[in-house]
Image (tube, rainbow, N blue to C red):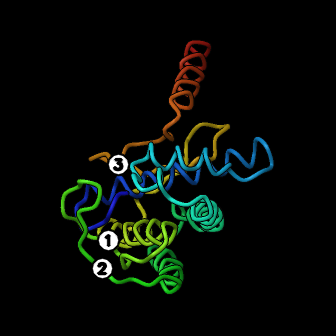
Amino acid sequence: MYVTSGNDTEIQLTIDAAIEFANAINDAIDDTGEILEPEAARRLLHDQGFSRAATAPIAAVRRLTQRVLDLLPRLSTLPTSDVGAAGTWVNAELTELIIAPSLSDHDGSELHVHWTPPSASFDDQVMADVLMAITQDLCEHGVKRFGRCAADDCEHLFYDSSRNGSRRFCSDPRCASRTHTADHRKRRKAG
């Protein structure tokens, strides 16, 4: 699992992983009308770097999936929100968690900070990491790093960690490709 101990890279990876997970949940609902299945959620979380997902109880994975789904409308406001509004909802979410930082070196990892006590459930640990990462990023960068895909047929969110803040598309390479191809055809037709 990523932790947010103040390291910009860890913060970026945590936020990016959370947004990718939220997009996947939203896609599953759009495609099937059902929430993302627990085993698919577990694989996605593990692939996004949440190493404890592999051994987390199914109930915790289900709770986390539902909690991220519930958070999705708020995450969706970040690209067009102001820092004050974003701070208000993050603070509201943080009041639902027990934040008790502790040091850990589980699973052979280097010493790092967990925002929850060792007894916290997997879903509480992930939610705390994600919310603390968003908190730290809002303090450092405001909302400017949060975006919505520029492809006409995509509503995915993304987190822009590029140096010049130039990212326009989500992580699906087809979005940028379709948009660039359409723009190229439009220029050729006009020229």
Q: Which mark is residue 76?
A: none
Q: What element carries label 3?
A: loop
**Distance Cα–Cα, label 3 vs label 1:** 29 Å
Q: What element carries label 1?
A: strand
Amino acid beneath label 3: Gly
Residue to which mark 3 is pinned: 165
Amino acid beneath label 2: Pro
Residue at 55 percent across and 44 percent down: it is 149
Q: Name the image quarter holding the C terminus.
A: top right
**First in sequence: mark 3 or mark 2?**
2
Residue at 23 percent across and 53 percent down: it is 108
Q: How crowded is mark 3: few (under 14 residues within 10 Å), some or many (20 or more)?
A: few
Q: How crowded is mark 2: few (under 14 residues within 10 Å), some or many (20 or more)?
A: few
Residue at 32 percent across and 73 percent down: it is 139
**Residues at discs 3 and 1 in contact (Cβ within 8 Å):** no
Height in image: 61 above or below 188? below
Q: Name the image quarter holding the N terminus.
A: bottom left
Residue at 41 percent across and 58 percent down: it is 15
Height in image: 138 above or below 170? below
Q: Which numbered disc, 3 or 2, marks the residue closer to the eye?
A: 2
Q: Is mark 2 on a helix, strand or loop?
A: loop
Amino acid beneath label 1: His
Near-viewer residue (76 or 124): 124
**Distance Cα–Cα, label 1 vs label 2:** 6 Å
Residue to which mark 2 is pinned: 101
Q: Which mark is residue 114?
A: 1
Please state if 103 lies on the left or on the right of 183 as rendered: left
Quadrant in the picture for residue 5: bottom left
